[in-house]
Amino acid sequence: MKRLFRPPAPDFLLHNTEAWGKDFAAKRTADPPYTLQWRQINGKKVNVILRELLAEKMTQHHCSYCDGGYRLGASAQATLDHFRPKSVVPLEVYEWENLFVCCNVCQEKKLEQFEEALLKPDAEDFDTFRYFVLNFETGEIGINPRATTSDKARAETSIRIFGLNDSPRPQMRLTEFTKWQNTLEAAKNLDDFNYRFFLEL
Ligand SMILES: [Zn+2]
């Protein structure tokens, strides 16, 4: 996970967050299996607009959670994830702060799981190395042994829920690290690589 900086919400979303959230929550209450039908603005689905905005301005086309999938959509599919699941907080279904662009792998691992300890990569006090250590022999992400007990629990929860050490992810990080090391200094553009937090030491 890498520290992310969230851009301001688009105006159309701010104007509608509450009303659209209430409408979705009411439909869910009336009919629990009701699945979200994203609203449209100028003929374009809101999830697509927000996903593209976040990929462009917040993650430079990386997954918010694993930082993989450079140019999401090519190597991996990009989706828009509700950090706090819509089944838990239906009113927040259009809440800007609750929406993250992520890869289909992270989303399939997370699904409707949520724990308060889960790390939010755009949190003001988030820092990769506050919570994690990186193992350059195995490619795994470990828990920082010097972290506080509560920070260790947050690191563990995040590794587990996003499946950050599930095969083949550690191997993929090592492969990317080798590619990074073999790239000439002048040609190194961090945003062109996956797993930036694993490379930028
Ligand atoms: Zn991911």
Image (tube, grey):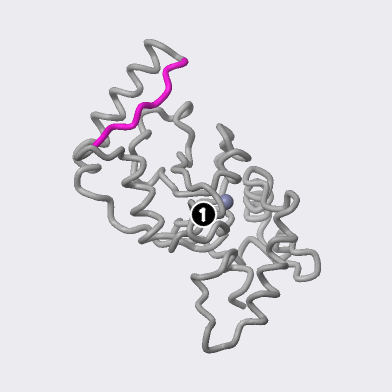
Q: Residue furthest front?
A: 74
Queried on whether the Cβ of the residue with tag 1 lies below 8 angstroms from ligand 1, the answer reads no
> Residue 112: x and y, percent?
55, 32
> Residue 183: x and y, percent?
61, 82
Residue shown at the point (63%, 61%) measured from the top left: 131
Q: Residue furthest right?
A: 137
SS category of the residue bearing label 1: loop
Above or below, 56 relative to 112: below
Query: What type of secondary structure mainly makes up the magenta span?
Result: loop
Residue shown at the point (48%, 61%) measured from the top left: 125
Q: Which residue is mark 1?
A: 74
Can residue 53 be found in the magenta stretch?
Answer: no
Residue shown at the point (35%, 22%) measured from the top left: 25
> Residue 58: x and y, percent?
40, 60
Per the rendered image, the range of residues in magenta is 33-40
Q: Nearer the viewer, residue 201 or 185?
A: 185
> Could you tell me the amino acid type at mark 1?
Ala
- The image quadrant of residue 57 is bottom left
Q: Where is the N terminus found, in terms of image quarters?
A: bottom right
Residue shown at the point (72%, 53%) measured from the top left: 165
> Residue 124: x and y, percent?
44, 60
